[in-house]
Image: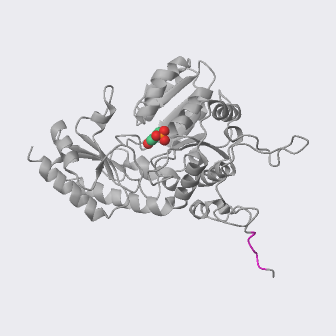
Amino acid sequence: MKAQTRDMFTPLDSDTYDPATVAAQADGWRSPTTGEFPPPISVGVTYARDTNYNTLAGRAYMRDQGSTGHEQAEAVITRLERGQDATLFSSGMAAASAVFASLPSGSRVVVAERLYFGVTLWLREFGRLRGLEVVEVDASNTTAIRAAVEASTTALLWIETPANPTWLITDITACAEIARDAGALLAVDNTVPTPFHTLPLTLGAHIVMHSGTKYLNGHGDVVAGFLVRGSSEDRSNVSLDSLWEMIQRHRRLSGAVLGPFETYLLTRGMRTLAPRMRQISATAQTVAEHFERHPLIRNVSYPGLESDPGHAIAAKQMSGGYSGMLSLYVDGSLERSLAAANACRLFLRATSLGGPDSLIEHRYTFEGPGSMAPPDMLRISIGLEEPADLIADLEQALDFAATV
Ligand SMILES: *Cc1c(COP(=O)(O)O)cnc(C)c1O
């Protein structure tokens, strides 16, 4: 019997290998001319044509077709999310807004009332300019979601779970059913759980959105975003095929194209997604359990805690852990929670999430007017440090806060 050899120049077979394996080898791409891997960063903005005015590989201009590096990043996230296709954007907001900008004018959009604040702001300001009817709903309540979606013809249901900054859980399978019944499309912001913990497309979602800035790149040094599409739905009010086509046109014509060096870093980051998420989520679970019964903490929001209101649904739709985001509520007091954040030595006082450095944020102060964050909430992004060091830092910060 002839040994089955692998052609070193073809992508890895994702039916044979776990997506984490495919990601570790960045989909198995090599330079087709030298075999070098990772393949070189392609930086050319434009492409030479032959005397018949044809290009060699169908690319004409980077803003229009992207580079081979874009294609590799898109191939990796498509495999990770078990999607059909993906498009890389210059930020998570560029990706999210491309969906809303590509819907037919007058479309009705139902969104979770607790969302990444930038998405909420975009919809409130530009959704109106676009002529979208935007309805905000409590997305931890399935009955409320169904009522909102069925109240009138709905084009899109947009959810995020666990949702910033309270980590409320939305039932993706229930939302997919509600969307299907009403002919709506379901889009899920999968930035926080990442495909390592949650696969919305396998639960019936049509589009997954990512801020690649966070866990996917994972090193806090790139701003990027993705949209990934699942299978088409025959009976939807807006066709997924035509929406996806408009999204591609939107990226070209709005110009939200990521630079080739950042694209390279993003692909490099995605190679280590699985081991990073494994460690980050285990640390977050340890920290959440440690502070759950702390005298100065009135509550901990973390879907990995059995006491968390979203735990049962989270356990159903997440696997391998609950990601690295949690919120601590400091004994009802704005002053004490700010004092605790200020007393941290290891946790950095900064926004964002998903990098190697653990971050702490007084979300109420950061979001400003219109914030729905409780004034005593500290939002925490767990990084790659040792759990005992992180716990000791929070302990000493809370000891200090108790004195103010
Ligand atoms: C950061 C973030 C975004 C926005 O992404 P950018 O890359 O900053 O534009 C959207 N959704 C979630 C959940 C995020 O954390």
Q: Which residues are magenta?
A: 3-7
What residue appears at the point 35 percent right and 43 percent down from the top-left corner?
A: 351
* x and y percentages locating residue 394 in the rendered image: 22, 54
Q: Nearer the viewer, residue 395 or 253?
A: 253
Q: Nearer the viewer, residue 256 or 127?
A: 256
Predominant SS along the magenta part: loop
Image quadrant containing the C terminus? top left
Whether residue 69 is visible, yes or no, is yes
Work out whether 318 lies above or below 371. Answer: below
What residue appears at the point 50 percent right and 42 percent down from the top-left corner?
A: 172
Total numbered badges shown on the rendered structure: 0
What residue appears at the point 34 percent right and 62 percent down from the top-left corner?
A: 385
* x and y percentages locating residue 235 in the rendered image: 68, 31
Q: Quadrant of residue 1?
A: bottom right
Whether residue 298 is visible, yes or no, is no
Q: Residue furthest left?
A: 403
* x and y percentages locating residue 32 in the rendered image: 75, 62
What residue appears at the point 87 percent right and 45 percent down from the top-left corner?
A: 50
Work out whether 373 lies above or below 46. Answer: above
Question: Quick check: 240 left or right of 98?
Answer: right
* x and y percentages locating residue 215 in the rendered image: 47, 52
Q: Nearer the viewer, residue 33 or 141?
A: 33
Residue 26, magenta (yes or no) = no
